[in-house]
Image (cartoon, helix red, strand yellow):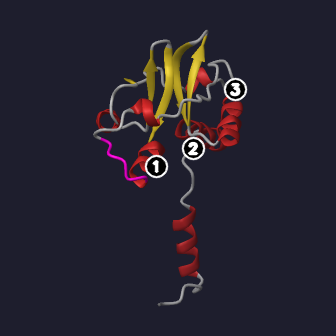
Amino acid sequence: MRVREIMHREVRTIAASDTFSAASKVLGEHRISSLVVSGDRGAAGIVTERDFVRLVAEGLDPATTRLADRMTRELVTIHPGADVAEAARLMREEGVRHLPVMERQQLVGILSMRDVLSWGVEEMTGGHELPDFEGSAAALSAAVGLERPG
């Protein structure tokens, strides 16, 4: 399967001059976990939930800290024609959870670790629901008397 088949084509962007507070509102409104930061020449960086955690951990103020000052500038990107397994490998090797999808230097989508995980589950199960292993184990344990009251 190719990245283009599971990527999100609607990519939310935000200006590098905006603050982390403004970015958090966009993330919350759209229930997403990353924003591509736009600059003069297209995608200038990315801001993710991890960046917010680091910002707060360092005691910085989201209302006054500009994205340009703290965003991830070294974008790890992928082509829409790449295999999804390659995207997963790239995410693992680079330690990222979001890949902007670029074609001819244009942002055409975004792929998240969640998208890759959903694809993997679909591949493993053939579209069938995964069994409830935890519930099944608890029921089996109870049935054979292995569970002891606390």
Q: Kindly identify which numbered label has been placed on residue 128.
A: 2
The N terminus, quarter of image: top right
Q: Amino acid at mark 2?
A: His
Instruction: Identify the disc placed on residue 85.
Output: none
Q: In this view of the protein, which residue sits in the foreground, 54 or 131? A: 54
Q: CA distance from mark 3 to mark 1?
A: 31 Å
Tell me how far mark 3 sits from mark 2, CA to CA: 23 Å
Label 1: how many Cα within 10 Å (few below 14, some 14–19, many 20+): few
Q: Nearer the viewer, mark 3 or mark 2?
A: 3
Extent of the magenta region? 58-62
Secondary structure beneath dot 3 equals loop
Q: What residue is shown with label 1?
A: 54
Name the dominant secondary structure of the magenta segment. Answer: loop
Q: Is residue 86 above or below residue 129?
A: above
Structural distance between the alpha carbons of marks 1 and 2: 38 Å
Closer-to-camera residue (83/57): 57
Amino acid at circle 3: Asp
**Most distant residue in the top direction:** 104
Of the numbered discs 3 and 2, the one sitting upstream in the chain is 3
The vertical placement of 69 against 135, above or below, is above
Percent position (x, y) of residue 94? Answer: 67, 39
Q: Residue at x 52, y 34 (%)?
A: 72
Query: Hey, what amino acid is under mark 1?
Result: Arg
Q: Mark 3 vs mark 1: which is more N-terminal?
A: 1
